[in-house]
Amino acid sequence: MNVLTKSMLALTTIVVFATSAHAQLPDPGMEIVPGSTALVVTDPQNDFLSPDGVTWGVVGKNVEENGTVENIDDLFATAKAVDMPVFISPHYYYPHDHRWEFEGALEALMHAIGMFDRKDALSLEGFEGSGADWLEQYKKYINDGETVVTSPHKVYGPETNDLVLQLRKAGINKIVLAGMSANLCTESHMRELIEQGFEVLVVTDATAAAQPPGWDGYAAAVTNFRMIANHIAPTEDVVASIRTAYK
């Protein structure tokens, strides 16, 4: 190989690398396939989605802007109408969880404000209407005897609960992901499900996040959704795709 050939190959390598580095972000997409696709909703609970919830002061504006409550409802209704499997990954704290020796920033806050608190893992005493309870309008979907409610995740992701096991046992390998909150539990679920080999479609307006002064959890999450998930889409498009897939 002469010097001119080596120089041309080097130049080609540089050009290809530069083109790849600046290429438009790909969108692999995700086909909704009956029998292997499920709706997974994280934390559809009062403390996130009700004006009476303990986080409403920082998430409420984004919930209302996105129409999050209504969009999650549309996903539930559509999934139930076509018999798509539905899984809930909830967030609960029991008294023993408050004895943890250390927490991250928002873990510490959640413990301090009593978020998702339940009196006992084996009792529903005080659960009805509490911050840990489902948003009232979702109960007809979640409490129908068909929805799978997993054990609670304890920080943000499903590494600490049985969601992945339940999905695998049900023959699911594709996920339509929605719920609260975008940059915490929803994003953490997306990341772990991707790591576990699932395809994940995130419904961008069926979630929301805290937006305290100087910080925007929702914008951060949407950026990561787009860069990591197989596809992102608004509720309207996802609902249409589900209906088409199940015709």
Image: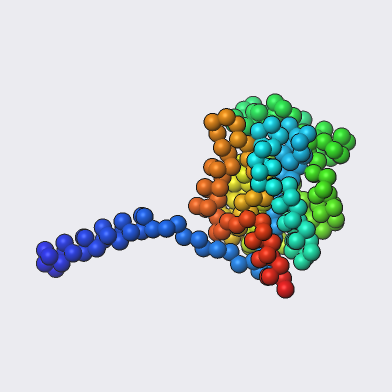
138 lies above or below 102: below
Q: Quadrant of residue 165?
A: bottom right
Residue drawn where x is 74% and y is 41% of the image = 49
Relative placement, left or right, of 14 versus 225 is: left
- The image shows residue 16 at horizontal and vertical percentages of 30, 61
Name, please, the residue furthest toward the right: 125
103 lies above or below 33: above
Relative placement, left or right, of 95 versus 24 is: right
Residue drawn where x is 60% and y is 35% of the image = 211
Asked whether residue 165 is in view, the answer is no
Residue drawn where x is 52% and y is 47% of the image = 223
Asked whether residue 244 is in view, the answer is yes
- The image shows residue 63 at horizontal and vertical percentages of 68, 42
- The image shows residue 195 at horizontal and vertical percentages of 55, 53
Q: Looking at the image, which is closer to me, 228 or 104?
A: 228
Name the colour scheme.
rainbow
Image quarter of the C terminus = bottom right
Q: Looking at the image, which is closer to me, 234 or 7?
A: 234
- Looking at the rendered structure, the number of numbered marks drawn on it comes to 0
222 lies above or below 231: above
Q: Looking at the image, which is closer to me, 88 or 32?
A: 32
Q: Quadrant of residue 83?
A: bottom right
Residue drawn where x is 68% and y is 65% of the image = 240
Image quarter of the N terminus = bottom left
Q: Quadrant of residue 114?
A: top right
Name, please, the residue furthest toward the bottom: 247
Relative placement, left or right, of 136 versus 212 is: right
- The image shows residue 66 at horizontal and vertical percentages of 66, 46
